[in-house]
Every structure is written in C-alpha cells, then in structure tokens.
Amino acid sequence: MRIALDAMGSDRAPAVEVEGAVGALRELDGDFVVVLVGDRERVEAELARHPDAPRDRIEIVHAPARIEMGEPPAQAIRRKQDSSIVIGLNLHKRGEVDAFISAGSTGAVMAGSVMLLGVLPGVHRPAIGAVLPTSGGYTLLVDAGANVDTRPHHLAQFGHLGTIYAQDLMGVERPRVGLLNIGEEPEKGDERALEAHRLLAGYEGLNFVGNVEGRDVIHHRCDVLVADGFVANVLLKFYESVAAYFVGLVTRAVEESGAQLDTRRIFKGLDYTEYGGAPLLGVNGVTIICHGGSPPRAIRNAIRVASQAVERSMVSHIERQIARRAEAATSQ
Amino acid sequence: MRIALDAMGSDRAPAVEVEGAVGALRELDGDFVVVLVGDRERVEAELARHPDAPRDRIEIVHAPARIEMGEPPAQAIRRKQDSSIVIGLNLHKRGEVDAFISAGSTGAVMAGSVMLLGVLPGVHRPAIGAVLPTSGGYTLLVDAGANVDTRPHHLAQFGHLGTIYAQDLMGVERPRVGLLNIGEEPEKGDERALEAHRLLAGYEGLNFVGNVEGRDVIHHRCDVLVADGFVANVLLKFYESVAAYFVGLVTRAVEESGAQLDTRRIFKGLDYTEYGGAPLLGVNGVTIICHGGSPPRAIRNAIRVASQAVERSMVSHIERQIARRAEAATSQ
C-alpha cells in the first residue's frame, strides 16, 4: 500500500508531516510506503533530522508550489498544477498511490478531490466526517464543513456515508445515526431539519435514532451525527477552542496550587490528535483532511486512518451501497 | 417597581422560584416587590419555609394551571387562561407589574409575550438574548433559539436589538457586534450569512466587527453575537453540557488525587447562574426567560436583570431606536 502525504500542508510544514510520517512507519502495523509530496530539498532537509527513518519505505515526489489558505479553492487547483495538493491527488487518480492526506487548505483539498478523483455515482455531495471525542467514545460528525446550504436529501445521505465509515473504520456494526437538531421531538427544528428527519426515518438500512440536541453531543447519543456543514463547523471549532480553554484554566490552577495532578491525563479522552484526520466521504478515492495546526501525532493517526480505509475497501463499500440504494429508489 | 415571577415554571417549582425571590429581595438593591404567580397554597407552603422573607415585598397572585414543556405554545396560551404564564403576562400587559420572569416552557413564554404584550413597531421578530461567559467577559448571543428559518434582515436587526441590550444592561458603550459564521472573510458562509454580513456592514450606528468563527466565541471577540436560532441553540446547549462535563472530569480527578484544589473557583467565570435569565428582545414589555433547570441563584439574577431592564428603560430605547431606523430607511 502506498499513501501520499502532502508535505507542505500544515502550519509547520514540512517538519510536522515528516515527523508524523516517520512515526507512522515506525509504530503502525502494515507494510505501507509513505510518499511525501512537496519541495524535495526542504523535505530531504527535514528527513535528515530523522536518521532513524526507514528510508526504504519513504519516497519523495517533488512539488514546488503550495496552495495557500486564502486562495479560492477551485481556481487554485486549476492554476497550480505543480502544487503538492494537485500532484498528490493526481498520483492517487492514476493509481500510483492508494490514498492522499493533507493538512493544507481544506477547501482546496475538497475541490481538488472532487475535480481530480471525481464523485462516486449517486453521491449528491461529498462530505467531511470529523471524529468528535465524547464521554462514551467517538461520534462521527457529517458533514463537518464541506457543504453549506445543504438540502434535506443531502443530510439523509450524509447519514448513509457516515454509517459506512463508522462500520469500516470505527468498528461499530450498527451505527446509531442522529440528526443534530434543537429538540428531541420529530416536529422540532427548522424546515431543513424537519424534512431531513422524515427522510432519515424512512431511509432503509439506517439505524436512525432521531434528533440529537446540542446538549446530547458530548454524551455519545449516537455514532454518526448528521448536520449541515455550517452548524457542524461552528460546533466543531467551538468544541476545539473551548476544550483548549478549559484545559488551560485547569492547568494554570493546578500549577499555581502546586497540586500533584496530571492534567493531560484528565482530558486524555478528549484529545483530537488521538484520532487524526477527517475523511472526505463520497469521492472516488481515499482523501484524509487534517487540521492546519496538526501535531505530528495527528499526522501519524491520519496515516493510520488512511491505511485502514484502503485495507477495508471503504470506497467500494460506499460505491456499492449508494448505487444499490439509488437502484432501489428508482425501482420503487 | 413590581416584578412578576412565574412560580410554577422551573423543574423544581415553586421551591426554586420562592428561594430565588427571597434571595433577591434580601440581597439586591432597589425598592421592588416580587409578585409570585402560581398555585397559592403551594407557594404559601414554600414561603413558610423562609421565615426571614420580607413578606411586605412579596405578593401572591393565584394561578391554578401550569403550561407543560411539551404543549404546543400558542395553543396552550389560548387555552390555559388560568396558567401562571398567561396570568403573569396579563398582569404585565395591564401595567400591574413592570416585568415578567419565567423558567417555564420557553416556547410558551415567547408565544405568550408576543400574543399578550405584542411586538414593538418595526421589530421583525423578537429574539432571545442569552449571555455566554467567555474568557474575557460576557457575550450576548442573539437569537438564542426563539427563531429558526430566519432571514438575513432578521439577523441584522438582532444585531441592533442586542446592541441596545448590551448598552443598557451590560454596561458596554459601543458594543462590538459579530456575525457567527464559518470563516473570517466576508465572502465566507452560507447564503443567509453572506447577505446578513452585507446588511450588518451597512447598518448605520452598529459597531459591526465582522464574522466570528466558532473558535472565537470563547475568546470574547464581540459583545453581541448574531446568529440564527438553530445554530445558536445548538451552540448554547453544547456549551452548557460540555462545561458541565469538563467540570465533572476535573472534580473527579481532584477528588481521586486528594489534591487541595477548589474546582468551583477554577470555573467560576463560566458559571451560567451568575448571569441569570435571557431577555426576550423586541416585545412590548420586559420578559426574562430562565432555564428550566435554574437554581435559586439564577432566579435571583433574573430578577436583577429584570429590574435593571425596567430601571434603564430598555423597552422604550428599543422602541425609539427601531422606529427611528425604520423612518430613516423609508426616507432614503
């Protein structure tokens, strides 16, 4: 298996990417190769700082350009053919690698994946699945920001895409699908949520458990949480920042008091980097999107997620199940 | 000044309401009377447990019925004329009290306020303002759940309503108004946010500071945070639950370690009950909505908020400013 990693994506690229890749190669099981896509000289210089790196499992594909965060995604993909994102995705498109990971511009990675890999037949809109740590385990939030102005049938399909991911990668046999909403009752919500609830309730094969309120998210009421990208983006970013803020408050108080307390242990279960990248579900390939501020640990975990998605044939599961459902819908 | 308090609203009514009222009368400045609206016998029984209560500043108005959480709001207001919410709001409508506070069904309090007190001229939709504790002070989130399927011009006016509240009750001379969105740049967001951004940027007299992302909310980037009720409801409920969850994690860890650390002090600034009720902005009266799970302290603070809103003539400020703006818009 060959996994391409955009070496120029994160805020501290390529140092973080190289360290994450070396960590993955040393610590994860499996016979995979990491293809670092980026400025060859800078990547080599960074690799030189890891004399223990298994060089026979690392390749470098030179990409001189980088797509910056502020650039209009689709335009950047078209114009910057020599960027690490375009070159990495083209490797995947041509079958030279099995997956692509980037901590660069989320918009550009999404646009590039759609334009270069394509969208699987029957998929309305590819969606990002972000893994939220909760009190009882992980919940996959779909769509975590790829789409705004979604329509109810998009949301219903997000529930299906999330279900396949949870089965293949989170080890949940019959994932509970919830709809993020402002009340528990089916008649609560805005127009979109009301109709999405109706569609999800009638979606054959899904284990729909109904509406999930903001207050329930932390309590692991579902394995897959369906939401419009706008709401999900606000929730996700708020969660990350509030968690960091709380940890800071507690750490300071513990330091000041001189108490013997390992604050990292208290919040261990809530560590985002434990889980790593977010899959872009519904494209014809394995694309994993990482936070721009990812530490090496998150990159390493993204490599793990990518390798599992390949190993467990997630893309063909999505392809087959969505096609089957589209057929069933047509024959009705 | 006379403040009506729905004595039957909260999950632990009337005990919480009576204790909150007694606390307010003893601890807050000002020469106000609390009118407890509810089942006279039960309220009297509860009052008997507070022999120190200043009975000359407490009145009871009998209301035999209670509107339950699940009841359809408008219908419940029409049918249950003898409920504490309808009787309390009618006291306010007739000018027999200056404000109304309830920890009962938010939907019923809103519907009742609109139906009985009426909406101020020029106000598109009344909105709930909820006070969020942040790292640098309080942010008023408008609309915190009164309205879904809002349109951009509703959001723009929420910024105006919130500004008046922040000036009158939060002591901010020139409140910074932010729009909850998924990116900092004006061109980010869904259709509603894009247009709301444009309207807010051109809204004369507002101190619009632009988009505020989920990650910025905790960092007090603005005094008034404008959002559709759906997103705000999710954010608010998530915030409450995640705060409680974190506090629980830390408290348990501290107990287990035997460390000498006052966890309540660490999180003091984040205590919701410090601030109390949420105003319903834009109706012709002072309506303060409390959480169903409010402790007595939150009720006491809601009484403080209500008395300040009356004292500082919040309603006539809203009336005058919204009318002036409507005039200016017409004459353009």
Image (cartoon, coloured by chain):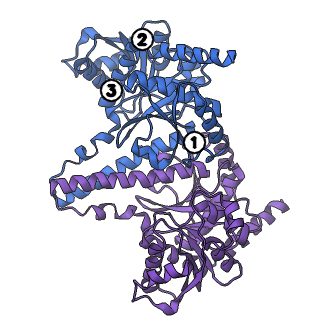
Chain colours: A purple, B blue
Q: Quadrant of the N terminus of chain A?
A: bottom right
Q: Tell me if mark 2 has few (under 14), some (14-19) or many (20+) residues whose alpha carbon lies within 10 angstroms of its own.
A: many
Q: Chain of mark 2?
A: B
**Image: A52 above or below B77:** below
Q: Secondary structure at mark 2?
A: loop
Farthest residue, direction right? A331
Q: Quadrant of the C terminus of chain A?
A: bottom right
Q: Write down the residue under mark 1.
A: A185
Distance between mark 1 and mark 2 Cα atoms: 35 Å
Q: Secondary structure at mark 3?
A: helix
Does the image show residue A282? Answer: no
Q: Which one is in front in this view, the residue at disc 3 or the one at disc 1?
A: 3
Circle 3: residue type: Asn
Q: Write down the residue under mark 2.
A: B98
Q: Nearer the viewer, residue B144 or B33?
A: B144
- Which numbered marker is on residue B14? none
Measured as percent of width and height from the top left, residue A331 is found at 85, 62
Distance between mark 3 and mark 1 Cα atoms: 31 Å
- Which numbered marker is on residue B301? 3
